[in-house]
Image: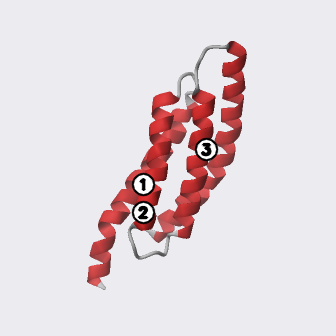
């Protein structure tokens, strides 16, 4: 799971850049069309959660406790919830929210699996 945390952290930080630019464009589009959607603003929040989750994932990949995994679950979980519920016409946000959900689920699996690994050693 250490490798997963490093790879997902790096990918999340890279995705942060793409999501930020897309969300700014979606927000401008929503403002110009005056359609009342909040997909661009939700995208910025998802991007921040991707960045924070990626940093925490990289920083806690070698930790022995559950705190890092809990933080990853909360950050990516919030990003997934925001993305799925507020996407509107910004359909790419659903893809980024799915990535957040995958990372949150894998962190949950890592947290559940970790005590068994410690007991075996």
Q: Residue at x 46, y 30 (%)?
A: 85
State if disc 2 and disc 1 touch (CB < 8 Å).
yes
Of helix, strand and loop, which one carries label 1? helix
Q: Which residue is mark 1?
A: 73
User: Upstream in the sequence, badge 2 or badge 3?
Assistant: 3
Front in this rendered view, residue 11 or 42: 42
Query: Is residue 98 visible from the viewing direction of this image?
Result: no
User: Upstream in the sequence, badge 3 or badge 1?
Assistant: 3
Of helix, strand and loop, which one carries label 3? helix
Q: Quadrant of residue 55?
A: bottom right
Is 2 drawn above or below residue 94 in the view shown? below
Q: Quadrant of the C terminus?
A: bottom left
Label 1 crowd (10 A; few <14 / some 14-19 / many >=20): many
Q: Which residue is mark 2?
A: 69
Is 102 drawn above or below residue 42 in the view shown? below
Of helix, strand and loop, which one carries label 2? helix
Q: Position of residue 90 (x, y in %)?
A: 58, 27
Q: Which residue is mark 3?
A: 47
Is 21 positioned to the left or the right of 8 in the image?
right
Q: How many marks?
A: 3
> Separation of disc 2 and disc 3 at Cα?
19 Å
Q: Residue at x 42, y 54 (%)?
A: 73
> Separation of disc 1 and disc 2 at Cα?
6 Å
């Amino acid at each position: 799971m250490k490798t997963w945390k490093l790879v997902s952290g790096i990918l999340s930080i890279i995705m942060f850049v793409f999501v930020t630019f897309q969300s700014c464009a979606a927000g401008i589009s929503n403002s110009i069309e005056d359609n009342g959607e909040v997909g661009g603003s939700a995208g910025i929040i998802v991007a921040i959660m991707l960045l924070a989750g990626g940093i925490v994932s990289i920083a806690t990949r070698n930790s022995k406790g559950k705190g890092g995994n809990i933080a990853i679950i909360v950050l990516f979980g919030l990003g997934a919830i925001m993305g799925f519920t507020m996407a509107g016409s910004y359909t790419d946000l659903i893809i980024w929210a799915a990535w957040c959900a995958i990372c949150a689920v894998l962190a949950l699996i890592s947290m559940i699996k970790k005590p068994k690994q410690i007991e075996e050693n």
